[in-house]
Image (cartoon, rainbow, N blue to C red):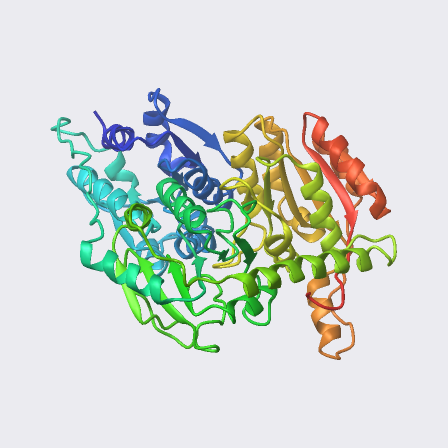
């Protein structure tokens, strides 16, 4: 048995089902070992970025293990932004990179850089394997760190000469032990109960990685049992279904957003799994609203987040026990909060109607409204990182987890076609739509070859205005002349023909809905070329 065979054996033991892969000569031994595995599926990608993004999305949608493999030097450096994306966004990706032989190398310093040191600042764990007998322990620890309750990115480097080493003791196996997390104690439940009973208008804020099946179940039960209002951050707006009458809004802006008027009327916030990685909503200190931090770990105190009580236990167990506890809520009054919600809904409808009075080019409110009206409740939308995601986070109602995918941590550009590819690969019967920009399409043509090769039935909406329009929009808002932000696009129709795509061009916004419906009915890669502009204000 070669060391590369042992490597794949350990991945199988850790229940790895899919590897996203960019091959090169240095990792031929691992390719050969992977060929003999019937448990792991190989997804060949055109670049390392796509491999990491698809691995992150696989875990996000399935809660199963995910690995992205590239080779050395520039292939490894190409992964840096995407590893940082996984680290900040709490996507526990394991990246495996290669290295030239470390015991004896004829090429000396040719193309050699310290990949492990490069990865350390953007991962929780990064190391190199210096002997075959270190493989089980290193991989076990890497998986354990990555899948901790606060997920992390990890990086493992496998030198070429270690991969082909002969394994003397192939029976060396590390067990898959289960980790028991601490449940909330009776005193902490009593503190929560007393604080809730003293409050007059408590609300719940759902942050960051509350995206867990049991948290969703018991948090929803608690909200429904006591009719307590809740709002969410952008990335995790679907943890609890937004068709509940208790749903207030999504915090899309740091300050002066629709939700803030409702928050002013609250005297207690239960902050579920807050983490400052996501752009925070400035709400705690400004109105002196008391805040209880409910999480697996203690909070970081700053100018926008300063809890006066911290409950550090298993979150799902906390809300399960709250559901089992009788809380006297006779003092609660949400009348003002729900009146503000109805006022905001009316204002949004008025803004949508006013937007419709302008020219034939679609604006973000109508874009969101049209997409929501065409897609089924369990269909999936993936957003690239641009200003329009604010309107989607605020106005696009989600009914099921993982049906609106966006990034508000590293806020990475050109991320989401890979996420969208993986979402469709995992959910072949659902409509999956990605919304992005014309400049992104030219930048990421390699991803679209992968879409065609995998025969994925996908729809891309390309917001086309031949410029870096959001920057131009902000440039104008700052009373600066428009300059330096326009570019030229290729003939997208001919480009589509060369790849075998289906291409739709929408000149009039009133044609968009029927075009999207038609695209969803086609079983191939469809691209909708849509003229788009922003309004003067975010409201």
Q: Is residue 463 above or below residue 458?
A: below
Residue 58 place in picture, x, y as percent: 44, 37
Tell whether 220 sits left or right of 234.
Answer: left
Compared with 102, 517 (above or below) is above
Quadrant location, the N terminus:
top left
Q: Quadrant of residue 257?
A: bottom right
| Of residues 331 and 109, the one drawn nearer to the viewer in this rendering | 331
Which is more toward the observer, 454 or 274? 274
Viewer can see residue 487: no
Q: Is residue 362 left or right of residue 457?
A: right
Which quadrant is home to the C terminus?
Answer: bottom right
In this rendering, the answer to whether 500 lies above or below 410 is above
Residue drawn at x 59%, y 72% as measured from the top left: 256
Foreground residue among 351 and 403:
351
What residue lies at 70% left-to-right and 32% top-to-bottom?
499
Visible in this render: residue 237? yes
Residue at the front extreme?
Answer: 330
Q: How many numbered discs sit on the rendered protein?
A: 0
The percent coordinates of residue 468 (x first, y second) are: 71, 61
Residue 97 rendering spot, x and y as whole percentages: 36, 44
- In the image, residue 119 lies at what x, y percent? 35, 56
Q: Is residue 291 left or right of residue 82?
A: left
């Amino acid at each position: 048995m070669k060391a590369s065979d042992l490597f794949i054996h350990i991945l199988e033991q850790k229940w790895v089902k899919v590897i996203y892969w960019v091959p090169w000569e240095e990792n031929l031994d691992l390719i050969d070992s992977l060929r003999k595995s019937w448990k792991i599926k190989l997804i060949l990608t055109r670049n390392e970025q796509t491999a990491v993004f698809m691995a992150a999305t696989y875990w996000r949608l399935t809660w199963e293990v995910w690995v992205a493999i590239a080779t050395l030097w520039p292939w490894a450096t190409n992964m840096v932004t995407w590893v940082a994306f996984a680290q900040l966004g709490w996507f526990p990706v394991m990246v495996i990179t290669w290295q030239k032989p470390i015991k004896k190398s004829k090429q000396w310093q040719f193309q050699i850089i310290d990949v492990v040191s490069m990865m350390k600042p953007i991962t929780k764990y990064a190391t190199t394997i210096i002997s075959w007998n270190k493989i089980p322990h290193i991989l076990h620890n890497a998986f354990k760190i990555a899948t901790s309750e606060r997920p992390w990115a990890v990086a493992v480097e496998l030198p070429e000469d270690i991969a082909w080493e002969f394994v003397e003791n192939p029976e060396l196996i590390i067990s898959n032990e289960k980790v028991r997390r601490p449940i909330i104690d009776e005193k902490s439940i009593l503190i929560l109960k007393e604080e809730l009973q003293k409050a007059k208008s408590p609300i719940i804020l759902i942050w960051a990685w509350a995206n867990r099946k049991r948290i969703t179940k018991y948090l929803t039960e608690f909200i429904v049992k006591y009719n307590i209002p809740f709002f969410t951050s952008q990335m995790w707006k679907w943890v609890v279904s937004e068709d509940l009458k208790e749903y207030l809004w999504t915090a899309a802006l740091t300050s002066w957003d629709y939700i803030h008027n409702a928050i002013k009327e609250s005297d207690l916030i239960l902050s579920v799994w807050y983490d400052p990685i996501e752009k925070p909503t400035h709400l705690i200190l400004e109105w002196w609203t008391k805040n209880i931090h409910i999480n697996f770990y203690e909070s970081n105190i700053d100018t926008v987040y300063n809890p006066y009580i911290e409950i550090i236990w298993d979150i799902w167990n906390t809300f399960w026990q709250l559901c089992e506890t009788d809380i006297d809520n006779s003092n609660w009054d949400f009348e003002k909060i729900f009146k503000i919600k109805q006022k905001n809904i009316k204002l949004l409808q008025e803004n949508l109607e006013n937007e419709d009075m302008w020219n034939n080019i679609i604006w973000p409110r109508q874009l969101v409204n049209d997409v929501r009206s065409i897609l089924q409740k369990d269909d999936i939308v993936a957003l690239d990182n641009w200003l329009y995601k604010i309107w989607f986070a605020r106005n696009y109602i989600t009914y099921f987890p993982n049906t609106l995918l966006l990034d508000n941590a590293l806020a990475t550009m050109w991320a989401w076609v890979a996420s969208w590819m993986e979402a469709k690969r995992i959910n072949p019967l659902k409509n999956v739509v990605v919304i992005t920009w014309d400049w992104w399409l030219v930048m990421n043509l390699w991803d679209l070859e992968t879409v065609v090769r995998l025969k994925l039935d996908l729809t891309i909406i390309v917001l086309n205005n031949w410029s870096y329009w959001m920057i131009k929009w902000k440039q104008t808002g700052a009373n600066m002349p428009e300059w330096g932000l326009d570019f030229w696009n290729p003939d997208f129709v001919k480009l589509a023909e060369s790849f075998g795509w289906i291409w739709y061009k929408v000149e009039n916004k009133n044609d968009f809905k029927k075009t999207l419906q038609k695209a969803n009915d086609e079983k191939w890669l469809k691209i909708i070329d849509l003229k788009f502009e922003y309004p003067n204000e975010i409201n």
